[in-house]
Image: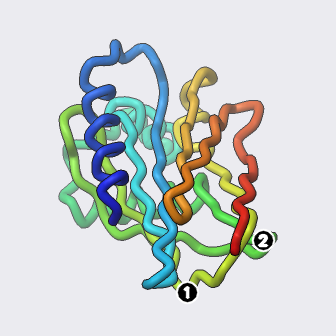
């Protein structure tokens, strides 16, 4: 991944640590790897917000995000993301593949990829994670293609949006 990707990730980690948490936000970074023909995706979500959302999704009010082992949690999160995070490239749906997670401070980082990606101009992202639990949830999405970064702010009223990149 590009060093810019690492810098943005570090900066986001610092922001997540110093922010007062009543703000409900997730940050997703999508980077096009043209050599490997894939989208590399990193999603950062506050653990307590995710737990609240999974309680509703699983219909288990007592669900404790720290109880399942890593494999079980990956299965739960993978299923959840399949329902709440989708990508379309030039009007063709692409299935994101959930790779795993890590806990960093009070946030989970999810690693996701889309393989077999050919050149595209327009990406549509639907990201309505956590929105079933918090009406004020904002999901920020940063997409990087050839060093150009464009961003979206997705909310309950606008859970999906598009970005277009000039492809040469």
Q: Which residue occupies 42% across, 68% down?
A: 98
Residue furthest to the front: 168
Which numbered marker is on residue 149? none
Indicate left or right for 168 with 36 as reference.
right
**Where's the C terminus, which quadrant?**
bottom right
160 or 50: which is nearer to us? Answer: 160
What residue is disc 1 on?
116
Image height of 105 relative to 30, above or below = above
Q: Which residue occupies 30% across, 45% down?
A: 7
How many numbered marks are there?
2
What residue is disc 2 on?
90
Q: Tag 2: Cα neighbours inside 10 Å, few (<14), some, or many (≥20)? A: some
Residue 35: x and y in percent read 45, 84
Label 1: element kind: loop
117 or 79: which is nearer to us? Answer: 117
165 or 134: which is nearer to us? Answer: 165
């Amino acid at each position: 991944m590009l060093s810019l990707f690492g810098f943005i990730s570090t900066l986001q980690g610092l922001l997540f640590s110093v922010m007062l948490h009543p703000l409900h936000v997730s940050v997703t970074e999508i980077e096009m790897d043209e050599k490997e023909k894939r989208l590399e995706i990193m999603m950062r979500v506050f653990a307590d917000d995710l737990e609240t959302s999974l309680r509703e999704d699983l219909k288990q009010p007592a669900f404790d995000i720290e109880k399942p082992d890593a494999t079980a949690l990956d299965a739960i999160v993978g299923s959840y993301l399949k329902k709440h995070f989708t990508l379309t490239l030039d009007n063709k749906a692409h299935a994101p593949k959930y790779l795993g997670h890590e806990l960093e401070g009070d946030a989970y980082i999810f690693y996701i990829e889309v393989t077999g990606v050919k050149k595209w101009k327009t990406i549509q992202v639907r990201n309505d994670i956590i929105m079933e639990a918090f009406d004020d949830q904002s999901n920020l999405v940063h997409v990087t293609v050839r060093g150009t970064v464009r961003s979206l702010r997705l909310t309950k009223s606008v859970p999906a949006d598009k970005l277009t990149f000039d492809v040469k």
